[in-house]
Amino acid sequence: MKSDPLRSAGLRHALLILMAVVVALPLYLAVVAASHTPQALLGHFPLLPGDMLLDNLRTVLSVGLPGTIPVWRMLLNSLVMALGITLGKLFISILSAYAVVYFRFPLRMAAFWLIFFTLMMPIEVRFFPTYQVTANLHLLNSYSGLILPLIASATATFLFRQFFMTLPRSLVDAARIDGAGPIRFFIDMVLPLSRTNIAALFVLVFVYGWNQYLWPLLTTTDAGYTTVVMGMQGMINAGASFALPRWDLIMATALLALLPPVIVVLLMQRWFIKGLTDSDK
Amino acid sequence: MTACPTGAASLKRNRAKPRRVVDAAPFPHRVLPYFLLAPQLAVTVLFFVWPALQALSGAFYQTDPFGLSQQFVGLSNFASLFEEHSYLRAFRVTAIYAVTATVLAMGLGLLLAVLTDGLLRARGVYRTLFIWPYAVAPAITGALWVFMFSPQVGAGAQLLQAMGVNWNYILDGDQALLLVIAMTAWQQIAYNFLFFTAGLQAIPASLLEAAALDGAGPVRRFWTIVFPLLAPTSFFLLVMNSVFILFDTFGLINIVTKGGPGEATQTLVYKLYQDGFQNLNLGSAAAQSVVLMVLVAGLTIVQFRFIGAKVHYQ
């Protein structure tokens, strides 16, 4: 057999560690920047973190930068939007999947294809006409306007539908013999059995919701609704307008903006990977 | 859009398999299902169907910027769109961006997947170290990288300048595009790594053992067995990476370059944003929306075809 450099576990680990360091570099530099005074960031870039991290975090959280709202309020807006999108998506998707799988009714397939249609319409494609509709409905500068246009989901509906179709028919027959109606069956059987699917989708959709940028940028002109991801632009503008650029505060905000979804993905890694790759099994 | 494969797969798979649901209705109710579907359909009609129709009709009209008058102009919005130099340029920028960032992200993702595959120790640790960028918003990725490569203060910029590179992406269009491509690849490695890892794990060990017994070395085994068997995964990732770059990179570009310098990093979605919301060219924006919808529809069909083919070959 030919000798293979990749067969040596030591070399593999060395390469992998090198790659992990490269991947982590942008995050490390952000931590370094967020933990120094702005003066320390001029000239040669410091290699090690300083001791200002907590001070900087406190400053942006409670005060923000000139022209921006405090970051704690941005985080709150992001949380409301992300949770609203997540719960909304899960709610309407699980209900429609239940309807399509457990009932036969006229126009069932038409409804199904209508939902399928949304698959082809990410917000980045339809934002321009959707903005006009949202404005007509007087939903600009509101949480509803941030959330509602993003909660229709073919993906989640299909995932639930696929899962429901794997549940044995005898389950529903037994429930009916016991006298359970569709709502009882949904609450007592379907919902508990869908736990892992709900968890998997929760992670995916929460990250999707938290990380929205374009839609909040268009629909919220009132600074009170700024989300932290979309507020990054204003932070950079405000921070760079000082004679001494406040990269320390900008990077502290960036850390606060990326931490929640990263924590959710890492803590719920198993569900996240299940949600992501379910289709590919 | 990230979770799209799920739906596509489920739909297609159910078509390929014998149907599991007995055709008699599990529940006989006729009205309840409409109530269950109502919220989803309401959102779909309000925020998807209606806007799509508006874009379609708007694309055939010329509206003045104040919305006071409208005039039917047939296909002339599309005609002038495809004559517009900067629109064709946005197509080209998007294509270059999509191809290079996809190739980079897929290559690195595959490398990481191959390196971690079969390791006895620390696989979970590596997975954690490699997947976290997936959760970072593209706009925040942009912020981290802008700081890293900002010509005045960035550590990366200082390194490049010390190496003699005349680094200033704010003035140099090629450097700007390169920077955007690099950070997009960084963002997407996680996704490709996860799917390639799943793809590698699905390859039966017996196949590789048989080849090894026949005297095929590891490199040969990779190119003759592993690589072809990863083809469906690769094709799927090709589509998903393209979709991400086409549509999900707006925030990144908005933070890093705003489409500039000049129009060096202006993608199709970014141009639509500028024409629709900054130049208030409504007819052109509607036509651009329609073009994007056709693009996504095309990609969705490609994705379906492929997943069908995969089920078939397996």
Image (cartoon, rainbow, N blue to C red):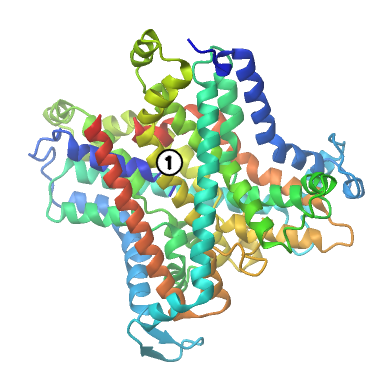
Say which quarter of the image contains residue A56. Answer: top right
Identify the residue under disc 1. B237
A179 relative position to A95: left or right: left
Residue at point 55% right, 21% down?
Answer: B124
B172 or B2: nearer the viewer: B172
**Amino acid type, callout 1:** Leu
* Residue A181 visible in image: no
User: Residue A201: where, in percent of width, then height?
Assistant: 42, 38
Q: Residue at x 39, y 80 (%)?
A: B79
**Residue A111 at what x, y percent from top left?**
22, 55
Q: Quadrant of residue B14?
A: top left
Nearest to the observer: residue B27 or residue B100: B100
Image position of B271 with respect to B22: above or below: below
Residue drawn at x 50%, y 47% is A208
Q: In which chain is the residue bearing label 1?
A: B
Q: Tell me: residue B123, above or below residue A166.
A: above
- Looking at this rendering, what residue extends furthest in the top direction? B213
Q: Is residue A98 visible?
A: yes
Tell me if mark 1 has few (under 14), some (14-19) or many (20+) residues whose alpha carbon lies within 10 angstroms of its own: many
- What kind of element bears circle 1? helix
Residue situated in front as seen by the camera: A186 or B207: B207
Specify whether B286 is left or right of A179: right
Nearest the viewer among B115 and B256 is: B115
Looking at the picture, how far across and down is residue B224, in whole percent?
Answer: 38, 25
Q: In this rendering, would B139 be left or right of A54? A: left
At 88% from the left edge and 50% from the top edge, which residue is drawn? A38
Q: How many marks?
A: 1
Residue B3 coordinates in the image, percent (x, y): 41, 43
